[in-house]
Image: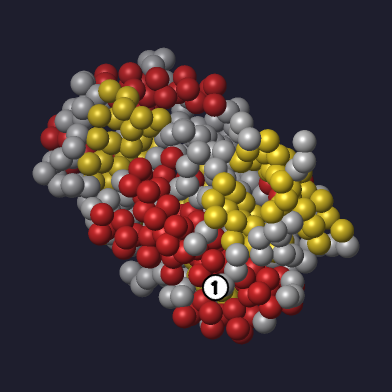
């Protein structure tokens, strides 16, 4: 059987927040663009892991730092009625948060991909990568039920989250904290929640919630709560919860009686998380006021991975860069979310470090150190463990994905590699696309 061979100018791997932004940007920048996704959907973690909301669009002062494709997706979703847009963060962790209807988000992203002219392959996994003279020369993929394909792109953008192309190519990755990656979670959505008693409990027990929280009303469309530590402790002490947590994050839709809970966590994987999901539902019914008739309406279709491989780029974003709001002449965008790191050995977070202002993301954090036509976007860009706690957030993934896709298109159309991209021209292109912070 002969192998199908495809020759797009830009190949993007992974159709999550970063990959969608990368593919749209590459196609709109004039490159023949192929987007390959291992699952049957676009939207990635934000859509199908049921994240409470997108975050990181604004800095602590309320200045918007993510524009471009990310903002266009939210605006499109607002037109369809699937998001209220950016609203104040009830728990005062960030200035804003951006609730989304998860299924509508994925459909809106698919609409944008179609309008940009991106070719999409779903249910397609990367199985091998070949390299010659510091270049990726071929990416082998397998589509369920259809067999294998060899892709020979000019440029590759790895937005897989796990840096799959980097790994199969033998490219260098970061080596700090190899055994301290953040734990994984499986988010769940509950229906049948009575928000009247739930919000009454929150108002009556402010010490059980994050300081500075605003407690919403049951007639509001969106509420956000971070806490419930006393109820979690009681459930663990009485053997109802097999793992310890000091807090959970609840994003609620009171008028619909629905809530997404971010509380499960493990370093072991899906089978442990499945038991934690069922324990959480039973705990919620027994301990949380207004939860007696709650039921499990949905579970993320994938384990939520906060951190896995991080590539080694020409530059590495550090904790000091993030905390000092460092400016950089090669900036391709900005990040502003706190350093948010879940401790794998403790029931809470090791970092919730707020930032004084936004920081620049250097172009070199997207470019493979040792392969000249390979870039990264999303949570696997070149960062330290601590900096990853900020840069991994979805709004910032939109930014790094769009920058990587734009750079790949410039290189592919111009006939050169990612190492030779004129950063000034890249920044001008990103500014024209509405990417904020591209100098």
Is any part of residue 273 visible from this angle? yes
- Is any atom of residue 205 visible in this view? no
Residue located 47% across and 19% down the image? 275
Which residue appears farthest toward the front when viewing the image? 1
| Image coords of residue 360 (percent x, y) | 55, 73
Front residue of 144 and 407: 144
Residue highlighted by disc 1:
29
Q: Residues within 10 Å of mark 1 (few under 14, many from 20)?
A: many
Does dot 1 land on a helix, a strand or a loop?
loop
Side (left or right) of 48 relative to 211: right
Residue 163: x and y, percent? Answer: 67, 49
Q: How is the image coloured?
A: secondary structure
Tell me where residue 75 sits by quadrant.
bottom left
User: With respect to residue 153, does 346 lie above or below?
Assistant: above
- From the viewer's perspective, is residue 203 above or below residue 92? above
In the image, 165 versus 11, the foreground residue is: 11
């Amino acid at each position: 059987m002969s192998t199908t061979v495809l020759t797009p100018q830009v190949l993007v791997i992974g159709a999550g927040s970063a990959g969608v932004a990368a593919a749209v940007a590459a196609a709109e920048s004039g490159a023949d663009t192929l987007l390959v996704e291992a699952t049957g959907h676009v939207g990635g973690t934000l859509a199908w892991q049921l994240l409470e909301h997108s975050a990181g669009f604004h800095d602590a002062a309320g200045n918007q730092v993510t524009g471009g494709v990310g903002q266009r997706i939210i605006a499109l979703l607002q037109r369809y009625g699937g998001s209220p847009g950016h609203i104040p963060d009830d728990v005062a962790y960030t200035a804003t948060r951006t609730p989304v209807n998860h299924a509508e988000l994925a459909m809106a992203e698919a609409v944008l991909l179609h309008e940009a002219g991106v070719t999409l392959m779903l249910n397609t996994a990367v199985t091998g990568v070949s390299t010659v003279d510091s270049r990726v020369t071929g990416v082998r993929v397998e589509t369920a039920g259809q067999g294998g394909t060899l892709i020979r792109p000019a440029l590759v953008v790895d937005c897989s989250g796990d840096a799959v192309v980097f790994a199969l190519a033998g490219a260098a990755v970061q080596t700090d904290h190899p055994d301290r990656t953040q734990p994984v979670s499986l988010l769940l959505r509950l229906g049948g929640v009575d928000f009247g008693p739930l919000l009454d409990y929150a108002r009556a027990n402010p010490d059980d919630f994050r300081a500075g929280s605003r407690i919403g009303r049951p007639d509001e469309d969106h509420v956000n709560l971070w806490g419930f530590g006393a109820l979690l402790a009681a459930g663990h002490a009485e053997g109802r919860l097999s793992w310890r947590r000091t807090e959970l994050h609840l994003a609620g839709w009171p008028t619909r009686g629905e809530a997404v809970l971010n509380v499960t966590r493990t370093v072991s994987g899906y089978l442990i998380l499945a038991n934690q999901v069922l324990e959480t539902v039973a705990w919620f019914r027994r301990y949380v006021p207004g939860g007696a008739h709650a039921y499990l309406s949905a579970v993320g279709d994938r384990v939520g991975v906060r951190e896995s491989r991080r590539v080694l780029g020409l530059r590495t974003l550090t904790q000091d860069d993030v905390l000092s709001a460092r400016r950089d002449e090669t900036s391709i965008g900005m990040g502003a979310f706190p350093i948010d790191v879940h401790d794998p050995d403790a029931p809470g977070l090791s970092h919730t470090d707020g930032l004084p202002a936004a920081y620049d993301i250097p172009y070199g954090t997207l470019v493979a150190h040792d392969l000249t036509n390979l870039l990264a976007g999303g949570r696997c860009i070149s960062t330290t463990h601590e900096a990853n706690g900020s840069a991994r957030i979805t709004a910032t993934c939109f930014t790094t994905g769009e920058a990587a896709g734009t750079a790949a298109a410039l290189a592919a159309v111009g006939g050169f590699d990612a190492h030779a991209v004129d950063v000034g021209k890249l920044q001008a292109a990103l500014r024209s696309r509405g990417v904020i912070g591209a100098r």
